[in-house]
Image (cartoon, coloured by chain):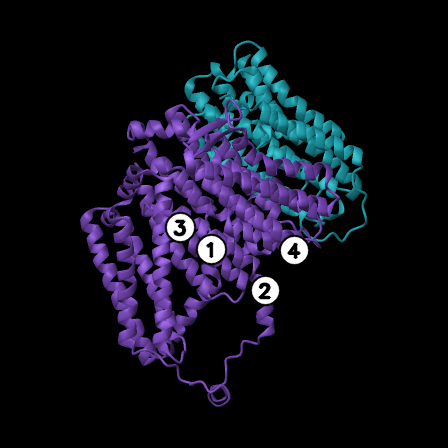
Chain colours: A cyan, B purple
């Protein structure tokens, strides 16, 4: 039974190779709103499964297996971040990056974090990913696809949408003052020093990935058909969500850091 | 709680928020608010600094419960005044310079956010505040350098800066967590007090915690201050707007020197990191200066000059002269800001004057000046060049702080000051002048004034920043074995004296031309190597391309899931 719980949770809080199923599930959800909902809900279901189906499945494993599991988690995280570097479609990029981040929740679970702590950590990563799915849908409506790098200079032609995509991407890659930054601090805080090295590599790859993503989004001269930017209302809603998300990172940083 | 101290970093942050919220479409309103906020920040910083000089004691102010504390010590107050001063200059310059650029209000808002973040960074009294601010500086700089989104080049070089900064963030993360897990506190003053009480009490991976954190902090500083192998981004930041280049080269790039000083209580107990810093700084100073000399673009040349200066600053830290590094970064900040902001005028002058060397016959007949330069005899000039700087430097240090003569770091620094002084005199010797004695006398007089002023200021600066005991501990930490040190000094002295005599002799006998003719191939090879910036950026680009290609292949193989 524990093994089944563990494997199901490894699909929802993606661990390689089961992370492939998670990505398939997100990718096949209907429309951008469906994908956004899926990326918000599925990892939370994973947390519920782990904490509310009896004893924690992971902690029942022998210590040697736990170590192998955690190494697999770190590999998954670095592996998906590395793959995201070459992704050019916004929703693919965001689900690969989300997979890279969400898998770290296992490190919290293994180190005795409380359920609300893990759920907050998961939310800190899945909310910006969900927002990116929605912005990707809106970009796709205008351009026929949400591929970056094909048309440069979206910041000039779609300044509002570009600003929201930029802020959401920054929120996803653990940029201060967003909650994902403090969530990552919590992971660092709970791990032994010897385990921190792969996480440093992960931070480097996230930075690289975000840099490439923004470079393709913002810079260059747009030479395509004229496009209509987001309405002021939608822009305000997006900005307010991101503002309160960042504010919650600042105000409840203690809950996210666990320090 | 001192509200005056706490509001300093919040003033520019508030201005940025107001611009984003209500002044996004008002160019004059955004500029006025931004300049006013920076002016207020600068004045408040000066008041706090003055207050500290008069009666103050270092203290920590808390904004949040876990993090968000501000350390009001001499280093913070000096850095606040310096950062807000440079920022004010850049703001005032930008008001007219950026007026025709798109997103003018956003530019000012970003400048304000950057100013606020740097103010938080230099005053952070806990590890989380330091990490947050340290990270954010890299992110904000990316957007400031990439302000002109129409140019793909500005995006490319902003990315180079961002990724190098990220490389520098990682050692600081690790250092922060090593300190936190070893001393169970986030507060820097608490951690430093524990280290001072028992420097070797905690060991990890075969070394003491101060040794590990010293090395990691030094690595973080190397990336921020463009040390060799992590310098490729710095000259290319010129693709950003000129005010950002000025802010970058005058302020942000100095973060390495600041970081060394903030963690000085750790470096008092670890020599290894300081020795590494000395070597890396020396290499950077030499490579940066060599690359500067071959540039034909004034701004690129200034960029490499910054690299050389940063190398020198890190080298000073490596020698234990921490307050001198702070003095250096402030002096360099102001002169580099003025050079950058005046670079446009220099380009205008160069366009007005063709720069063709004068025709000797015209010079002799029409201008009635000698065609062959009148110079002092080479032996006299060599003697003056070698002896005068060493005498002036030694005497000025002797009268100001005799005890420092027993510190290895001070002697090594005197060597470098000696070379610099000798270089100035040699340059004067090579100038054409009707009265060479008058020229040399003028240069010597200026040199004496500069050295005395520099010695006095750096001495009082050191007394303001560090206690006498802390200064001595830092010098002691940077010291090496006495035998190795003395051998090194003898070799250096022989090299310097021999080198200068040879230089003057070679100059008098025109040896340089003969050597360059004989070794023309080698000279060209070195020139090509330097002109391609030692192929370091090319190597990084190639490695990146290979990794990207591997990432793409993996994605195709796994069907992007």
Q: Are marks 3 and 1 in contact (CB under 8 Å)?
A: no
Q: Give how far apart the Cα atoms at labels 3 and 1 are.
A: 10 Å
Q: Earlier in the sequence, mark 3 or mark 1?
A: 1
Q: Distance from label 1 to label 2 (Cα)?
A: 20 Å
Q: Which residue is mark 4?
A: B97
For this rendering, which residue is in front, B485 or A201? B485
Structural distance between the alpha carbons of marks 1 and 4: 23 Å
- Dot 1: element: helix
Mark 4 to mark 3: distance in Å?
A: 31 Å
Q: Residue at x 58, y 50 (%)?
A: B90
Residue B149, percent from left and from top: 67, 50
Label 2 sits on residue: B345
Q: Is residue B245 visible?
A: yes
Q: SS of the residue at dot 3?
A: helix
Residue A162 higher or lower than A29, as above or below: below
Q: Quadrant of residue A96?
A: top right
Query: Which tag, 2 or 4, sits closer to the chain's start?
Result: 4
Badge 3 is on which residue? B313
What crowding class fits label 4: few (fewer than 14 Cα within 10 Å), some (14-19), or many (20 or more)? some
Mark number displayed over residue B348: none
Q: Nearer the viewer, mark 1 or mark 4?
A: 4
Most distant residue in the left direction: B483
Confirm or deny contact between disc 2 and disc 4 (CB under 8 A): no
Subunit that carries the residue with mark 3: B
Which is in the foreground here, disc 1 or disc 2?
2
> In the figure, residue B525 lies in which quadrant?
bottom left
Asked if disc 4 and disc 3 are in contact, CB closer than 8 Å, the reply is no
Q: Is residue A206 visible?
A: no
- Image location (x, y in percent) of residue B465: 38, 40
Badge 1 or badge 4: first in the primary sequence: 4
Kindly identify which numbered label has been placed on residue B306.
1
């Amino acid at each position: 039974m524990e093994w089944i719980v563990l494997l199901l949770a490894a699909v929802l809080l993606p661990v390689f190779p089961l992370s492939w199923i998670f990505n398939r599930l997100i990718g096949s959800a209907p429309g951008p709103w469906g994908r956004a909902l899926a990326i918000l809900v599925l990892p939370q279901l994973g947390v519920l499964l782990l904490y509310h189906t009896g004893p924690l499945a992971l902690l029942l494993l022998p210590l040697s297996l736990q170590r192998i599991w955690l190494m697999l988690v770190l590999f998954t995280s670095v592996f998906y971040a590395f793959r995201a570097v070459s992704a050019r479609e916004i929703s693919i990029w965001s689900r690969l990056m989300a997979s890279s981040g969400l898998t770290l929740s296992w490190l919290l679970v293994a180190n005795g974090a409380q359920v609300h702590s893990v759920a907050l950590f998961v939310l800190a990563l899945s909310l910006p990913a969900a927002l990116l799915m929605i912005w990707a849908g809106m970009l796709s409506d205008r351009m026929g696809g949400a591929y970056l790098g094909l048309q440069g200079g979206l910041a000039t032609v779609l300044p509002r949408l570009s600003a929201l995509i930029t802020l959401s991407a920054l929120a996803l890659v653990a940029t201060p003052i967003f909650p994902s930054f403090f969530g990552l601090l919590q992971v660092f805080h709970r791990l032994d020093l010897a385990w921190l090295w792969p996480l440093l590599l992960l931070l480097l790859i996230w930075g690289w990935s975000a840099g490439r993503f923004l470079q393709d989004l913002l810079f260059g001269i747009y030479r395509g058909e004229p496009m209509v930017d987001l309405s002021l209302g939608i822009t305000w809603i997006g900005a307010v969500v991101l503002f309160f998300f960042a504010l919650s990172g600042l105000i409840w940083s203690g809950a996210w850091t666990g320090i | 709680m001192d509200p005056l101290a706490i509001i300093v970093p919040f003033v520019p942050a508030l201005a940025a928020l107001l611009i984003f919220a209500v002044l996004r479409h008002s160019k004059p309103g955004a500029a006025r608010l931004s300049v006013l906020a920076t002016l207020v920040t600068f004045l408040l910083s000066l008041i706090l600094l003055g207050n500290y000089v008069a009666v103050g004691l270092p203290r920590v102010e808390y904004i949040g419960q876990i993090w968000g504390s501000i350390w009001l010590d001499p280093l913070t107050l000096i850095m606040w005044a310096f950062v807000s001063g440079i920022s004010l200059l850049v703001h005032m310059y930008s008001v007219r310079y950026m007026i025709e650029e798109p997103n003018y209000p956003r530019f000012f808002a970003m400048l304000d956010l950057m100013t606020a973040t740097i103010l938080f960074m230099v005053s952070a009294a806990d590890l989380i505040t330091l990490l947050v601010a340290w990270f954010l500086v890299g992110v904000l700089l990316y957007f400031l350098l990439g302000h002109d989104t129409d140019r793909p080049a500005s995006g490319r070089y902003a990315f180079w800066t961002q990724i190098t900064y990220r490389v520098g963030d990682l050692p600081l993360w690790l250092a922060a967590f090593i300190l936190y897990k070893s001393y169970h506190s986030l507060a820097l003053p608490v951690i430093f007090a524990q280290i001072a009480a028992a420097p070797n009490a905690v060991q990890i991976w075969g070394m003491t915690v101060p040794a590990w954190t010293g090395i990691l902090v030094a690595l973080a500083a190397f990336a921020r201050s463009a040390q060799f192998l992590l310098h490729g981004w710095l000259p290319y930041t010129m693709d950003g707007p000129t005010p950002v280049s000025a802010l970058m080269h005058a302020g942000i790039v100095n973060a390495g020197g600041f970081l060394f000083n903030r963690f000085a209580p750790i470096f008092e107990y670890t020599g290894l990191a300081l020795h590494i810093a000395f070597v890396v700084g020396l290499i950077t100073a030499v490579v940066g200066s060599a690359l500067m000399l071959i540039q034909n673009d004034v701004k690129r040349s200034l960029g490499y000059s910054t690299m050389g200066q940063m190398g020198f600053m890190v080298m000073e830290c490596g020698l234990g002269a921490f307050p001198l590094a702070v003095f250096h970064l402030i002096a360099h900040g102001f002169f580099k800001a003025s050079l950058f902001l005046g670079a446009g005028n220099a380009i205008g002058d160069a366009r007005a004057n063709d720069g063709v060397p004068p025709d000797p016959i015209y010079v002799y007949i029409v201008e009635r000046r000698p065609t062959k330069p009148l110079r002092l005899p080479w032996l006299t000039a060599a003697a003056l060049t070698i002896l005068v700087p060493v005498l002036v430097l030694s005497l000025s240090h002797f009268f100001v702080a005799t005890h420092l003569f027993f510190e290895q770091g001070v002697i090594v620094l005197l060597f470098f000051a000696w070379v610099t002084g000798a270089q100035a005199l040699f340059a004067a010797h090579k100038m054409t002048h009707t009265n060479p004695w008058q020229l040399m006398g003028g240069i010597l007089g200026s040199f004496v004034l500069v050295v005395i002023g520099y010695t006095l200021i750096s001495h009082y600066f050191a007394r303001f920043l560090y206690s006498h005991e802390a200064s001595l501990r830092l010098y002691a930490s940077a010291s090496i074995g006495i035998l190795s040190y003395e051998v090194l000094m003898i070799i250096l002295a022989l090299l310097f004296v021999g080198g200068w005599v040879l230089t003057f002799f070679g100059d008098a006998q025109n040896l340089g031309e003969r050597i360059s003719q004989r070794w023309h191939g080698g000279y060209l090879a070195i020139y090509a190597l330097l002109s391609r910036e030692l192929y370091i950026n090319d190597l990084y680009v190639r490695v990146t391309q290979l990794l990207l290609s591997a990432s793409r292949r993996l994605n195709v193989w796994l069907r992007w899931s």
